[in-house]
Amino acid sequence: MSLSPEQRAEIEAQRATIASTRRTVANGMEAQLYTAHEVLDHGFVRVIDYMGDDAAICQAARVSYGKGTRSVSNDEGLIRYLMRHWHSTPFEMCEVKFHVKLPVFVARQWIRHRTANVNEYSARYSILDREFYIPAPDALAAQSTVNNQGRGALLEGEEAARVLEVLKGDAARCYDNYEAMLSQDGQKGLARELARMNLPANIYTQWYWKVDLHNLFHFLRLRADMHAQYEIRVYAETICRVVADWVPLAYKAFEDYRLGGVALSATGMACIRRMVNGETVTQENSGMSKGEWREFEALLNG
Ligand SMILES: Cc1cc2nc3c(=O)[nH]c(=O)nc-3n(C[C@H](O)[C@H](O)[C@H](O)COP(=O)(O)OP(=O)(O)OC[C@H]3O[C@@H](n4cnc5c(N)ncnc54)[C@H](O)[C@@H]3O)c2cc1C
């Protein structure tokens, strides 16, 4: 379970408090505020605060005095133009702050995105909960034989059972020892900042993560991609749905140009032009390496 009944009650109380404001609000994001979206077995993502909406992007692009919004189609056209031409600073005018609960090994990938502000739960100050990520059967995959950085077929039967037993057993044993080291009857107990070093990377941590929309799109482009590791991708996909509610026009442009779009090399573009002109292009006459050609073909075939 990712949230206790007390935590759920706190969230509901916060959602019930309504403030009046002169600030622009995005109705889709107002509906999202504070709600926890469950991810993996104990994780979640929830929006704590945000600034701006689609109109704020247009307002900044036009450097307007008032709302800066014209018709929706006009704004949509402008947002698509900005996205298409990498005019990215207007997107930086929107900000969002998330509360994320995630396994430590996912956090290690996430924290590589340096253009955000982070404050993590302190395991020097507090005791970590006994919560570990244990993959569901449909995420328990073998090492890929073609991609060193990927997964292959699912583990099944006895092998799956053995792996799950190891994961659960190690997590339980490490946490028992963590607790035992922290305090023992009549002993001082090891400092929390030291006792935590014995915990495995599938234990959950939490942080507040604040980022602007431009850098969030960069994060989502990399982490909602099908090549990203499943355990971070499910967080990115959850955030994608939140962003679609928050800034629907910007998200649509992002989905079209970045998430669903591709960047082609000059060599790739030349091959496409030759194909359009009826020429048979193969790896041998393409000017691409075997790996490049494999990826190029995958792009063309969807
Ligand atoms: C599929 C995949 C596999 C990966 N594998 C590995 C791996 O094996 N090992 C590994 O270490 N990492 C790996 N990474 C992490 C990757 O190298 C990046 O660190 C991570 O994706 C963050 O990207 P970023 O630096 O563009 O993002 P951010 O840190 O958010 O930066 C955004 C942009 O700001 C600019 N920027 C930010 N900081 C600097 C800086 N100090 N100097 C110059 N420009 C800066 C850059 O233009 C950057 O693109 C992997 C990532 C992915 C998606």
Image (cartoon, rainbow, N blue to C red):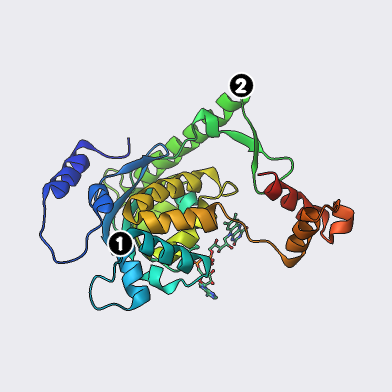
The disc labelled 2 sits on which kind of residue? Glu
Around disc 1, counting alpha carbons within 10 Å, would you say few (fewer than 14), some (14 to 19), or many (20 or more)?
many
- Residue 139 lies left or right of residue 95; in this view the side is right
- Residue under label 2, please give it: 158
Residue at horizontal 43 percent and vertical 63 percent from the top: 77
Whether residue 265 is visible to the viewer of this picture, yes or no, is yes
- Residue 162 lies left or right of residue 72; in this view the side is right
Ligand 1, what quadrant? Answer: bottom right
Q: Is residue 9 above or below residue 99?
A: above
Q: Where residue 227 sits: x, y (%)?
A: 60, 48
Of marks 1 and 2, the one in the foreground: 1
Towards the viewer: 39 or 182: 39
Q: Is residue 167 above or below residue 63?
A: above
Q: Where residue 149 sits: x, y (%)?
A: 65, 49
- Residue under label 1, please give it: 53
- Residue 244 lies left or right of residue 273; in this view the side is left
Towards the viewer: 159 or 98: 98
